[in-house]
């Protein structure tokens, strides 16, 4: 555990502005993707990865799964992959475009929260004709990101931020509610105690404090927040965090709202801190 060298907004810029440095050029990973059906699902990604991971490099070499690693590919599939993993996948696709002519996929929209068990297929075809034909490699990958083949969810964002800062040496999985028990155990129960790099945990979502702008009153603090949610990795500035009188498992609940752009998820959160990790 140590001092961070990059704030969360630096990590947002790394992913999205100008983006990840692939062989095809800088590519923004500016999309949210979650395997959870109620959060939209990962049907396009599943359609692609189930075949792409077993494709052989150059037709006779090792499979993509062997080159990149099965665990890394699994994490990318569920929206929790590292930037290096996405770049490796994109580079593999670009140098094996001829094989993509035989790789058929389903292009799927987000699943509807009202009917999360129903897959929503918008079109089908082979990857080359759908994306690479008539486009630059960079434009092809960008369109695949837009069509939900690649992206990052809230847990993937905060976990890979820790990896980016060398706070972790390997990925450690957990649902949002498990983070205060496993990865950021220290309690923050007063608005005046909130600091950069504190974690904000909803019942099913997680984000991180990028900066503290100052107290609005003795129970409210204005902060900047970074996360991946609807719209992908982002920084929401001037967010209001107000302490309530309620506690859950010894942690005070805060009401979070507002922001520019507006927070994609508002409501009640707890604030948790990772011991020894600071700016």
Image (tube, helix red, strand yellow):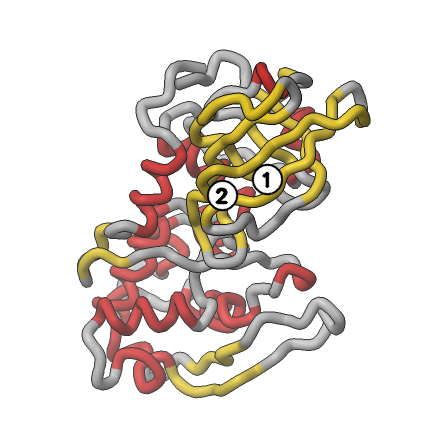
| Residue situated in front as seen by the camera: 191 or 63 | 191
Q: Quadrant of the C terminus?
A: top left
Residue 60's place in the image compared with 5, above or below, is below
Does residue 226 appear to the left or right of 166 in the view shown?
A: right
Measured as percent of width and height from the top left, residue 242 is found at 65, 30
Cα separation, mark 1 vs mark 2, equals 7 Å
Q: Earlier in the sequence, mark 1 or mark 2?
A: 1
Q: Nearer the viewer, residue 222 or 187?
A: 222
How many residues crowd mark 2 within 10 Å: few (<14), some (14–19), many (20+)?
A: many
- Identify the residue at image location x=51%, y=44%: 259
Badge 2 element: strand
Residue occupying image coordinates x 34% and y 72%: 143
Height in image: 77 above or below 191? below
Give residue 206's mark: 1
x, y percent for residue 157? 47, 43
Looking at the image, is 168 positioned above or below residue 30?
above
CB under 8 Å between callouts 1 and 2? Answer: yes
Residue 188 in view (yes/no): no
């Amino acid at each position: 555990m140590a001092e961070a060298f990059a704030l969360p907004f630096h990590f947002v810029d790394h992913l999205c502005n100008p983006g990840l440095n692939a062989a095809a050029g800088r590519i923004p990973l500016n999309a949210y993707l979650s395997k959870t059906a109620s959060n939209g699902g990962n049907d396009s990604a599943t359609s692609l990865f189930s075949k792409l991971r077993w494709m052989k490099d150059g037709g006779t070499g090792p499979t993509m799964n062997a080159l990149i690693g099965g665990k890394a590919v699994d994490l990318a599939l569920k929206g929790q992959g590292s930037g290096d993993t996405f770049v490796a996948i994109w580079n593999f696709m670009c140098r094996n475009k001829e094989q993509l002519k035989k790789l058929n996929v389903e292009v799927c929209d987000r699943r509807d929260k009202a009917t999360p068990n129903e897959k929503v297929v918008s079109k089908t075809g082979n990857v080359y004709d759908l994306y690479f034909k008539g486009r630059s490699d960079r434009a092809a990958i960008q369109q695949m990101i837009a069509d939900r083949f690649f992206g990052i969810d809230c847990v993937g964002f905060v976990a890979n931020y820790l990896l980016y800062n060398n706070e972790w040496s390997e990925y450690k999985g957990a649902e949002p509610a498990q983070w205060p028990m496993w990865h950021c155990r220290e309690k923050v129960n007063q608005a005046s105690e909130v600091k950069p790099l504190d974690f904000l945990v909803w019942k099913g979502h997680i984000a991180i404090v990028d900066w503290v702008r100052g107290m609005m009153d003795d129970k409210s603090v204005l902060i900047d927040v970074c996360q991946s949610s609807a719209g992908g990795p982002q920084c929401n500035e001037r967010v209001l965090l107000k302490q309530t009188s309620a506690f859950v498992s010894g942690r005070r609940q805060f009401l979070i709202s507002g922001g520019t752009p507006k927070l994609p998820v508002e409501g009640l959160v707890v604030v948790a801190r990772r011991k020894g990790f600071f700016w």
